[in-house]
Amino acid sequence: MKDIRFDNVTKSFPTRSGTPFVAIRDVSLAVAEREFVAVVGPSGSGKTTLMRMAAGLDHPSEGSVRVGGREVTAPGPDRAVVFQQFALFPWKTVRENIAFGLRCKGVPRARQDEIVAHYLKLMSMEGTEDRFPHQLSGGMQQRVAIARSYAIEPDVLLMDEPFGALDAQTRTVMQEELVRLTRKEPRTVLFITHAVDEAVYLADRVVVLARDPGRLREIIDIRPTREAEDWDSRPIDQVMDLASFTHLRTQVWRLLRDQIRPDD
């Protein structure tokens, strides 16, 4: 397993005016090995930019991003990315989509079948092996995307609004599924979301960003409360009714409220 470190990271983009747009300024953040960190912030606070730099899809203008102590210079098999759009191959079956990364790594076919069967069972998807993406609901498609990411056994899982395209009911189910999966087979997770409830329910810590430019505002530690009250064994609706959950959600929301504009 590996940790993620952002050390004094600034990211700017060129503009037509010649004055660079600063998306993130001087952000330092450490995500410990096997820790689940959710990042929230208003639009324009640099949430996705942080994730893309950890993935090696963008690079800091200043500072450094390291995974497992090594500077990130490009995408790598130690990091899997799950985007909001499901990004499945429409011409491949569920089985073939999940096995795609394994095949690229040269994993023997028999072992591919074992791994695919394991994640089909873990994601409650038995019986869908031979279906194509268009035959699945949005929630099921995202389960396939998550299973495909887990199947290659990455050290780090980077998730950018993975449930943002789902309806409210499906999103709730997927949040419970992700808690179950990440507690059973923990990875180092950086999870980007706009939803405060989602961040508090899923994460060990919630990172709150401010904007103009994006910068670290505060970090809220969720894990001690979650473990003390055993949130993971309770249905999500029971957890969200707890006074402790309401307190933490309000704490995060107050940090965000003065950053949000009417047009967000």
Image (tube, rainbow, N blue to C red):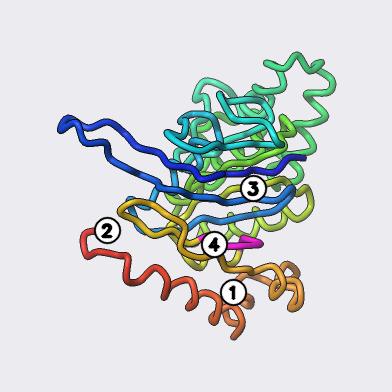
Against 140, is 210 above or below?
below
Give the residue furthest to the bottom: 243
| Secondary structure under the numbered disc 3 in the rendered image | strand
Mark number for residue 199?
4
What amino acid does circle 3 point to?
A: Val
What amino acid does circle 2 point to?
A: Asp
Instruction: Please report contact status of discs 2 and 3: CB closer than 8 Å, yes or no.
Output: no
- Answer few, some or many: residues within 10 Å of disc 3's Cα (few below 14, many 20 plus, some between 14 and 19): many
CA distance for labels 2 and 3: 26 Å
Point out the tag, 2 or 4, that comes first from the N-terminus.
Answer: 4
CA distance for labels 2 and 4: 19 Å
> Hey, which quadrant is residue 48 in on the image?
top left
Which residue is at 62% across, 44% downward? 5
Instruction: Please report contact status of discs 1 and 3: CB closer than 8 Å, yes or no.
Output: no
Q: Which residues are magenta?
A: 202-207
Mark number for residue 237?
1
What amino acid does circle 4 point to?
A: Ala
Choose mark 1 or mark 4, whichever is in front: 4
What amino acid does circle 1 point to?
A: Asp
Point out the tag, 2 or 3, that comes first from the N-terminus.
Answer: 3
Which residue is at 79% across, 38% downward? 118
Count of numbered badges drawn on the protein? 4
> Hey, which quadrant is residue 154 in on the image?
top right
CA distance for labels 1 and 4: 15 Å
| Secondary structure under the numbered disc 4 in the rendered image | helix
Left of 263 or right of it: where is 60? right
Question: Residue 146's x, y, as percent?
Answer: 62, 40
User: Which residue is disc 3 drawn over?
Assistant: 189
Point out the tag, 4 or 3, that comes first from the N-terminus.
Answer: 3
Left of 106 or right of it: where is 213? left
- Answer few, some or many: residues within 10 Å of disc 2's Cα (few below 14, many 20 plus, some between 14 and 19): few
